[in-house]
Amino acid sequence: METSAPQGLKACGAPNVVEDEIDQYLSRQDGKIYRSRDPQLCRHGPLGKCVHCVPLEPFDEDYLNHLEPPVKHMSFHAYIRKLTGGADKGKFVALENISCKIKSGCEGHLPWPNGICTKCQPSAITLNRQKYRHVDNIMFENHTVADRFLDFWRKTGNQHFGYLYGRYTEHKDIPLGIRAEVAAIYEPPQIGTQNSLELLEDPKAEVVDEIAAKLGLRKVGWIFTDLVSEDTRKGTVRYSRNKDTYFLSSEECITAGDFQNKHPNICRLSPDGHFGSKFVTAVATGGPDNQVHFEGYQVSNQCMALVRDECLLPCKDAPELGYAKESSSEQYVPDVFYKVKTRWCQKREVDGEQCGR
């Protein structure tokens, strides 16, 4: 079932931009979760509806939490429906990008570092878990795509990097979801060792993008390996990325944020014409069974803003930690806080600069 696009956000957006085909398609869909009549709970005829069988909204958290596996983040288009689903239809809501820089053109005082005011000073940032995600699933078209990429590590033992080329399609397992389908992996010039990767200048980058476009493909993400052989006879690899260590290091998060900033999500509901990113991060690493697993990630819009405005740095002695820079005479950095739970289960805000001290 098709429906009209959200009206409330149009007035404060950028209606002249051309969104991706998948975004145009999903914005026309109904998105509601239809349920059949429950023979035990429903007390009406086949044409009636009640609270037990009425269609649910795509952002219904109870429904998402009871899926297998549970969905912690609703899709981006479900999030838009939630913003526009109230009585005001999103009239007073805008998809604004976060800025960590001082606003230019303030004439009431001298420029930084000699002056600053509440009009030009960026707001403090409290890190929160993002309620939505721009891409809900990553899928390789066939196993050959991934196997060819892993061949380099199998032959040399060195880590490897590649760009994911494919297309964005509907992910039907999630209401109004988006899937990144990977058709090919391009491996640019690089220097890889057993524990590091260095990207080199690629003179063929534009040509590769042009060829991909003619094939109906585009750059949808990046992939890298983090594999350490554990037993060569059994073909097992070390399981190192988990809840007790980290899933992505701070340096990898910063790199992902940089890539996402370079590939923004075109959005007509944002005054800037773009909001977030659909660029994904894939990691080939060891799983709990000591076999090679592929894991997919994206960093939040908050992380993208901190990376874009050069406010976030990795910790040298703790790869899982990053910290916010301190303000200097060259750059003002807003306060960055994050919340922790005390032993009494109370939430407390902590200054993001403390990790780097």
Image (cartoon, rainbow, N blue to C red):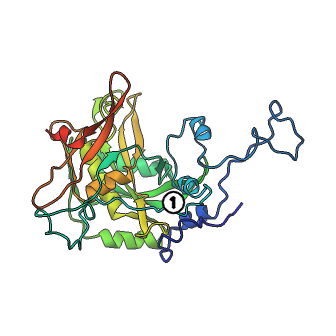
Furthest toward the top, the residue is 343
State the image coordinates of residue 204 (x, y, percent, origin top left).
29, 70
Q: Quadrant of residue 162?
A: bottom left
State the image coordinates of residue 193 (x, y, percent, origin top left).
19, 45
Residue in front for this viewpoint, 143 or 175? 175
State the image coordinates of residue 352 (x, y, percent, origin top left).
24, 42
Residue linked to disc 1: 168
Residue pictured at 31% horizontal, 44% vertical: 225
Task: In the rendered view, tell whether residue 333 sits above or below residue 5.
Answer: above
Residue pictured at 37% horizontal, 63% vertical: 263
Is 243 on the left-hand or right-hand side of 323? right
State the image coordinates of residue 157 (x, y, percent, origin top left).
25, 41
Is 352 on the left-hand or right-hand side of 298? left
Quadrant placement of the N terminus:
bottom right
- Tell me if residue 159 can be seen: no
- Identify the amino acid type marked 1: Tyr
Q: Is mark 1 on a helix, strand or loop?
A: strand
Quadrant placement of the C terminus:
top left
Is 186 on the left-hand or right-hand side of 20? left
Task: In the rendered view, tell whether residue 17 sits above or below residue 61.
Answer: below
Task: In the rendered view, tell whether residue 26 sits above or below residue 144.
Answer: below
Graded by Cα atoms within 10 Å as few (under 14), some (14 to 19) or many (20 or more), the crowding at tag 1 reads many
- Tell me if residue 286 can be seen: yes
Furthest toward the bottom, the residue is 16
Is 291 on the left-hand or right-hand side of 27? left
Residue in front for this viewpoint, 66 or 263? 66
Residue in front for this viewpoint, 51 or 283? 51
Furthest toward the right, the residue is 45
Residue pictured at 39% horizontal, 56% vertical: 221
